[in-house]
Image (cartoon, helix red, strand yellow):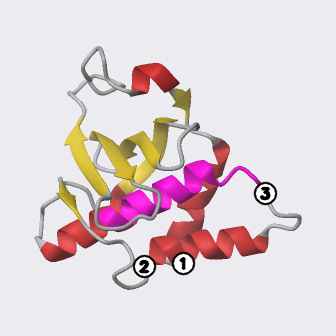
């Protein structure tokens, strides 16, 4: 896990987010999940560009999003996603943003144990406070949009 400034150039993930937002009339209000996911993918790509293989995830290998959690109450982002990959592996991705997706933002990728649907997190992990949900439909829509423009 490393920290990066996600403003260091545009990315296809942030571009896809912008296109998705502009394409909806009237504007949708359910982009919290999508923005967090887009910024998280961007951070992972930046990490891997700075240090190849730093994060064991290539976003183009994501088959689907299984579950997610996030802090809906803060001015910053804190959230996580269970990702099912094309190769059959399942990964847990977690990220944090201080409100600006700047230098204090970070993302981490860890494998989920084989045969498990969810990550093995500490019993006092912040996700317990906010709860897990099945992947919101807007995340699947966003993932399809990213793949279509890639």
Identify the residue at image location x=36%, y=49%.
96
**Circle 2/circle 3 CB separation < 8 Å:** no
Query: First in sequence: mark 3 or mark 1?
Result: 1
Q: Which residues are the magenta region?
A: 29-43
Query: Which SS class for mark 3?
Result: loop
Q: Nearer the viewer, residue 62 or 118?
A: 118
Query: Which SS class for mark 2?
Result: loop
Distance from label 3 to label 1 (Cα)? 17 Å
Q: Nearer the viewer, residue 21 or 73?
A: 73
Mark on residue 54? none
Q: Nearer the viewer, residue 61 or 14?
A: 14
The residue pinned by badge 3 equals 28
The residue pinned by badge 2 equals 11
The residue pinned by badge 1 equals 15
Query: Which SS class for mark 1?
Result: helix
Measured from the top left, where is residue 87 in percent x and y?
Answer: 28, 48
Compared with 63, 66 (above or below) is above
**Residue 22 magenta-drawn?**
no
């Amino acid at each position: 896990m490393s920290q990066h400034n996600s403003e260091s150039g545009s990315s296809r993930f942030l571009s896809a987010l912008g296109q998705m937002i502009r394409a909806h009339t009237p504007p949708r209000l359910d982009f919290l999940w999508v923005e967090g996911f887009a910024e998280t993918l961007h951070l992972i790509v930046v990490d891997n560009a700075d240090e190849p293989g730093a994060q064991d995830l290539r976003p183009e290998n994501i088959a689907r999003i299984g579950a997610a959690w996030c802090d809906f109450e803060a001015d910053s982002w804190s959230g996580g996603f269970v990702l099912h990959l094309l190769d059959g592996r399942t990964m847990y991705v977690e990220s944090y943003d201080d409100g600006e997706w700047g230098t204090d933002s970070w993302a981490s990728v860890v494998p989920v144990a084989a045969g498990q649907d969810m990550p093995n997190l500490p019993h006092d992990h912040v996700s317990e406070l906010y709860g897990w949900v099945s992947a919101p439909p807007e995340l699947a829509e966003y993932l399809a949009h990213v793949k279509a423009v890639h």
